[in-house]
Amino acid sequence: LQWKYPFKLAFGLFFQDNKQQAIDEFEYVLTLDPNNVWAYGFIALIEGDFGNYDEGLSNCKKALLIEPNATAIYALQAELYRRKKKYFKAIRSLLKYKKLYKKHD
């Protein structure tokens, strides 16, 4: 439970556009809870915003190793592959997202 307050701080920093500080705080969250899928997801999102697509994809992969059914991570991964012009991988990620999302209907 001790990761929740740093996570909330990181989340707030993200929405205040203090993205590097948010990454630092999400990384701190990962020291407290190494299996926090959403910390990896937000780091991936921010790295993508910074143009660091490989770093973003690396964090997506770490998140998916922890939670293979994290639909939002597949959507993010698809967008990062699209930005890298890796269209086949982007489509593959979107198809996985779509398959998992249908289970929620």
Image (cartoon, rainbow, N blue to C red):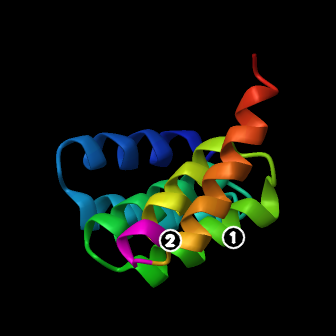
Residue at x 49%, y 40% (from the top left corner): 5
> Mark 2 or mark 1: which is in front?
2
Name the foreground residue: 62 vs 20.
62
Residue interval drawn in magenta:
81-85
- Asked if residue 68 lies in the magenta stretch, the reply is no
Residue under label 2, please give it: 87
Report the side of 32 relative to 18 (left or right). Answer: right
* Tag 1: amino acid: Lys
Pick the front one: 67 or 12: 67
| Residue 1 visible in the shown view | no
Q: Residues within 10 Å of mark 1 (few under 14, many from 20)?
A: some
> What secondary structure predominates along the stretch shown in magenta?
helix
Vertical order, 55 against 59 (above or below)? below
- The residue where tag 1 is placed is 62
- Residue 91 falls in image quadrant: bottom right
Residue visible at 38% across and 49% down?
A: 10
